[in-house]
Image (cartoon, helix red, strand yellow):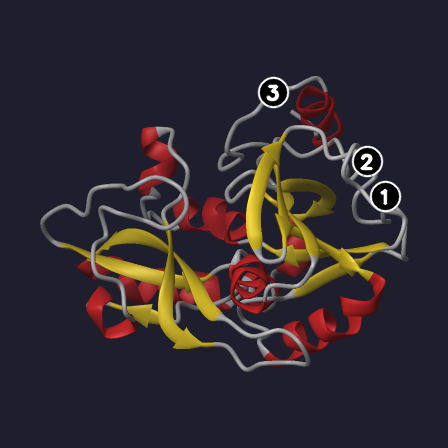
Amino acid sequence: MTPAQARALFRRGVRTPTAGWCAGWTQANLVAVPHDLAYDLLLFAQRNPQACPVLDVADPGEVGTPLFDGDLRTDLPAYRVYRDGELVEEVADARSVWRSDLVTFLLGCSFTFEDALLAAGVPVRHVELGRNVPMYRTSLACRPAGALHGPLVVSMRPVPASLVPTAVRVTSRYPAVHGAPVHVGDPAAIGIRDLDAPDYGDAVPVERGEVPVFWACGVTPQAAVRASRPPFAIGHAPGHMAITDARDSTYLVP
């Protein structure tokens, strides 16, 4: 399936996590904020590049970018709407809540390197099970910027212990889509109490002989919205990504 075909399905109301969709095409996190907060968000991303790698930024009011030849208001499976930091609704079509002053950011997503992990023999459990990737708010604080502050969010994939070095090597070659893991091993060391209770997404089992491996996650700006409580923001529903017209190979470094 091409990105355009996937976006057409989402525009018609298909709601699903997008892990495993459109193999070879880059997926992205979305966050849209009013123009007067856009510089703070850009600075927040610059100061926290592993969690918030910027792939593209739309002009104020624009609903498409060269990276995303679609409508940013309708062509993702689901959106989350925040008012004063509170999640007030999740919608499949954001046109009714979109504002003409919004600046939309597309941020790198770890789904981009999952095909490379699979090709290297590293299993991707949530794809195997047809689930959303588990994501967790950590006790690690991001570097604040202007009005924005908040915790680092991570995604987790169980990896056989013998393949952890491979997973690190493979993903480190994708720095624009979160890159190498930020933590390997004990979840409690980064403030995660229970792997079976993710803050976003679905739990997946960690089998005997496997190690939980954690990557920085592009839901981090939405956690910053929750913590900082700006008047208004829109994000993608976690795991329900923007499928762009860029190739994963674009973000692979030697």
Which element type, helix, strand or loop, lies under badge 3?
loop
Look at 72% across and 74% down and name the residue there.
40
Q: Amino acid at mark 3?
A: Val
Circle 2/circle 3 CB separation < 8 Å: no
Q: Which secondary structure lies at badge 2? A: loop
Q: Quadrant of residue 167?
A: bottom left
Crowding around mark 2 (Cα neighbors within 10 Å: few <14, some 14 to 19, many 20+) is some
Image quadrant occupied by the N terminus: top right
Residue 148 is situated, as x and y percent measured from the top left of the image, at 62, 73
Look at label 1 and name its amino acid. Val
Earlier in the chain: of badge 2 and badge 1, it is 1
| Circles 2 and 1: CB atoms closer than 8 Å | yes
For label 2, the residue is 71
Nearer to me, 88 or 167: 88
175 w.r.t. 4: above or below = below
Which label belongs to residue 14? 3
Q: Residue at x 33, y 33 (%)?
A: 128
In the picture, the disc for residue 63 is 1
The part of the image, by quadrant, that contains residue 169 is bottom left
181 vs 106, left or right, is: left
Separation of disc 2 and disc 1 at Cα?
Answer: 5 Å
Mark 3 packing: few (<14 Cα in 10 Å), some, or many (20+)? some
Among the two numbered marks 3 and 1 on one chain, the one whose residue lies closer to the N terminus: 3
In the rendered view, would you say 190 is above or below 123?
below
